[in-house]
C-alpha cells in the first residue's frame, strides 16, 4: 500500500528558481495538506485542500502556491525560491468524518528535503 | 499566542521505565481534538493516539496513554515500559472546532531518548 507519496525526496535549488513538489495519495481521501518542518518550530501548515478544485491558506502560505486538479494529487509550487524556504516539506491527507465522529488522523508522506542556496 | 506548547525540548528515560511528555493547549472552542505523533530519525510521522474534547475517558493505545486534564488544558502522553525503539521526536497537535477541515496545529516537539 503506497499511502501518501511525495516526489522528489530531495532537491537543491538556487535562489530564484522555481519548482513543484508533487503529493499523491491512493486512499481516496478528501483532505490534503502541505506542512513545512523547521528545527525548533514543529510543523506549520502552508496550504490545504478540502476537495478537488479547492485550496485554502494555512499558517505560512507566502511564497507558495498549490493546486488540486485531481482528488488524489496536491501540488506545492515555489515560484521564486528563497533560502528561507529551505525546509523539510510534508504532505498529508485525511478522510471525511464518519457519522460526525472525528478521528482526525493525518496520513503523512515521507517528506521532501529542499535546500535553497 | 502559541496554541500548543511542549515545554520539554528533550527527555531521557531508562529502558522499561515510564515517561510522561507534556503538552498544554489553548483554545476557546468547546469542540477540539488532541493528537500525538512520533517522528523517528527516519523522518516519517507516525500517528500514536487521539483524544476528543468530549471523550469521558482518557485514550489508550497499547503502551501509550493520554492523560487528558481538560480544566488544566493539558494532554500529556504517557509511554509505559519504554523501549529503545521509542527514541524519537514526539509532537502534540490540536484540531479546533468541528473537523470540517481537519487541519492540525503542531507543537514544537520533544525529543525522547531511551537508554539501556
Image (cartoon, coloured by chain):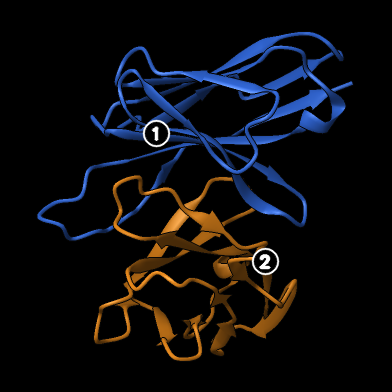
Chain colours: A blue, B orange
Looking at the image, which is closer to me, B115 or B20?
A: B20
Residue A32 — which label?
A: 1
Looking at the image, which is closer to me, A46 or A110?
A: A46
Residue A59 location, x and y as percent? 60, 43
Disc 2: CA contacts within 10 A as few (<14), some (14-19) or many (>=20): few
Query: Which chain does the residue under circle 1 lie in?
Result: A
Q: Secondary structure at mark 2?
A: loop
Q: Residue at image x 35%, y 29%?
A: A2
Q: CA distance from mark 2 to mark 1?
A: 26 Å
> Which quarter of the figure is the N terminus of chain B placed in?
bottom right
Looking at the image, which is closer to me, A29 or A56?
A: A56
Q: Residue at image x 62%, y 25%?
A: A9
> Which quarter of the figure is the C terminus of chain B placed in?
bottom right
Q: Give the residue at mark 2.
A: B1
Up-down: is A29 above or below A115?
A: below
Residue B59 location, x and y as percent? 31, 79
Residue depth check, mark 2 versus mark 1: number of the one nearer the observer: 2
Residue B28 location, x and y as percent? 45, 72
Residue A111 — which label?
A: none
Q: Residue at image x 67%, y 69%?
A: B110
Query: Which chain does the residue under circle 2 lie in?
Result: B
Task: Tell me how many marks there are.
Answer: 2
Up-down: is B100 above or below B27?
A: above
Amino acid at each position: 500500500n503506497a499511502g501518501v507519496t511525495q516526489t522528489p525526496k530531495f532537491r537543491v535549488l538556487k535562489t530564484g528558481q522555481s519548482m513543484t513538489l508533487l503529493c499523491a495519495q491512493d486512499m481516496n481521501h478528501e483532505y490534503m495538506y502541505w506542512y513545512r518542518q523547521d528545527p525548533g518550530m514543529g510543523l506549520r501548515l502552508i496550504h490545504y485542500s478540502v476537495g478537488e478544485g479547492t485550496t485554502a491558506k494555512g499558517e505560512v502560505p507566502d511564497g507558495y502556491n498549490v493546486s488540486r486538479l485531481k482528488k488524489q494529487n496536491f501540488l506545492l509550487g515555489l515560484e521564486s525560491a528563497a533560502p528561507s524556504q529551505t525546509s523539510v516539506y510534508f504532505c498529508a491527507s485525511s478522510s471525511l468524518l464518519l457519522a460526525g465522529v472525528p478521528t482526525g488522523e493525518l496520513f503523512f508522506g515521507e517528506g521532501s528535503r529542499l535546500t535553497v542556496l | 499566542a502559541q496554541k500548543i506548547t511542549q515545554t520539554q525540548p528533550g527527555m531521557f528515560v531508562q529502558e522499561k521505565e515510564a515517561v510522561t511528555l507534556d503538552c498544554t493547549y489553548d483554545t476557546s472552542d468547546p469542540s477540539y481534538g488532541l493528537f500525538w505523533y512520533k517522528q523517528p530519525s527516519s523522518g516519517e510521522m507516525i500517528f500514536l493516539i487521539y483524544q476528543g474534547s468530549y471523550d469521558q475517558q482518557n485514550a489508550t493505545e497499547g503502551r501509550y496513554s493520554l492523560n487528558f486534564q481538560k480544566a488544566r488544558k493539558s494532554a500529556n502522553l504517557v509511554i509505559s515500559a519504554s523501549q529503545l525503539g521509542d527514541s524519537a521526536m514526539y509532537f502534540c497537535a490540536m484540531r479546533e472546532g468541528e473537523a470540517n477541515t481537519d487541519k492540525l496545529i503542531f507543537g514544537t516537539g520533544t525529543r525522547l531518548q531511551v537508554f539501556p
